[in-house]
Structure formats: structure tokens, C-alpha cells
Amino acid sequence: KQEVTQIPAALSVPEGENLVLNCSFTDSAIYNLQWFRQDPGKGLTSLLLIQSSQREQTSGRLNASLDKSSGRSTLYIAASQPGDSATYLCAVGTGTASKLTFGTGTRLQVTL
Amino acid sequence: EAGVTQSPTHLIKTRGQQATLRCSPISGHTSVYWYQQALGLGLQFLLWYDEGEERNRGNFPPRFSGRQFPNYSSELNVNALELEDSALYLCASSQHRGQLAKNIQYFGAGTRLSVL
């Protein structure tokens, strides 16, 4: 059974700082990994998708890497802004069922 | 282009009642997924529909059911509501064309179900 863990559970940083969020998974037989953000009480916004054959993806200030063999992914956020404050979730697609298994998230607060 | 839309936004029911939640996928998407986000439990996969058929379900009792209509919209029904069914229910859609690795799921804003 796939299990996804995210560390840290919560993080507070001052504006402008670069930061890294971590995601680990137990079953390396994944077909992709997605990073999402969730604002309080809202749905999910897809940030980046990394296919199993890829090592990283970039979008603006965001960079996500994937090391499938070690079961790890990181989300790097450059020059953080208060608007980045949200919960960040990683989710892995495993097997043929087309379902995602989610981590418990990292709650990020960027302070002025 | 409209995103995934869910209705209602909020739903209040009492124990034992039935709840019906609705989801309209992004135009052109044939797959619809339902997830439950209960407080302290994280996001749990509920159901996956594709081309009108249920393709997979998560570890939930049979009183959680649904269907997908010919226009690819979907309903989630929860019968005999229990207090622990209180949660945010999220719907997602994707273009499921067999290329799982490229399968991005796009989420709606959710329906918050409160069972009293």
C-alpha cells in the first residue's frame, strides 16, 4: 500500500526566503507525482506534474524534483511571497487505477 | 474555459439522511474522481468514473456511491449519513486517454458536507 509523507508539517518563513518542501513515498512504482496548493477551505490548484520518466519540472519560481528510486520529491520555492502562504500537497499516481495517493501536506506561512 | 464546478458549496444534513453532491468536469474531460478530505485524515480517494463506468473505488463502505452521466458530469451519493461523513468532498477531472503519466487531475472547489 502506497504511503506518502510530507515534512515538515508546518513552516513559517520571512518574505524573500528560498525554501524546500519534502515528500516521500514508499512504493517507487509510480507513474507520476503532482504538487498542489490548497488555500483554506478551498479546492486544490495543480502546480506541477512530474512524469515518472522525468527528473524535474519548473514553473516560474517553483521547481519540483523527483528521485523515484529513493522515493523522494522536493518542491523548491524561490523568493517566497506572502501570497505563497497555503498548504502544499504532494500526490503520487501508482499502479493502473488512475487514483492519487496524497500526503498530509505542509502548511506554509510567509510573513512580511 | 470553465474549470471543474461542484454544487452545492455547502450542505447540511442530519444523521441517517442522504446527501447528493454534483460535479461538472472540464469540457473534454471524460474522467471524474471523488475524494474526501475529513479533518485530520487528509485526502482519501473515493471513486473514479470514466466513460460512464465506475473504474475504481477506495476503501469506503457501499453507502458511498455515484454515477457518471452521458455528458460526463457526476453525482456522489452518500446514504445513511453518519457524523464522521462530515468533510470537504472534492471532485477532479482529467482527460484519461491511457497515458497515465501525463494524467493531470484538475480539482473543483469542493462541497462542504456537515452532518449534525
Image (spheres, grey):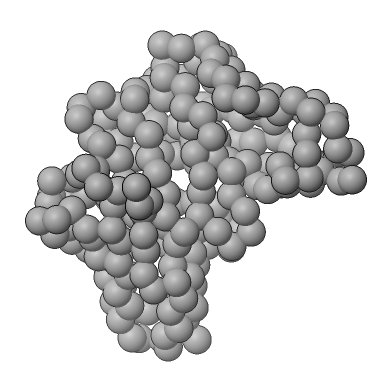
> In the displayed image of the protein, which residue is found farthest to the left?
B70
Could you tell me which residue is drawn at 34 percent across and 25 percent down?
B102
Residue B46: x %, y % from top left: 34, 54
Tell me which residue sits at (85%, 32%) in the image.
A16
Seen in the picture, residue B100 relative to B36 is either above or below; the reply is above
Residue B8 appears left or right of B29: right
Residue B85 rendering spot, x and y as whole percentages:
44, 71
Q: Position of residue A60 (x, y in %)?
A: 62, 25
Q: Position of residue A50 (x, y in %)?
A: 47, 22
* Residue name at image x 20 percent, y 30 percent: B97
Q: Quadrant of residue A97?
A: top left
> From the viewer's perspective, is residue B50 above or below residue B18?
above
Q: Nearer the viewer, residue B99 or B5?
A: B5
Which residue is located at x 23 percent, y 60 percent?
B74
Residue A27 visible? The answer is no
Is A91 located above or below residue B33 in the figure?
A: above
What quarter of the picture does the N terminus of chain A occupy? top left
Q: Is residue A67 visible?
A: yes
Asked whether B46 or B11 is in front, the reply is B11
Count of number-bearing discs:
0
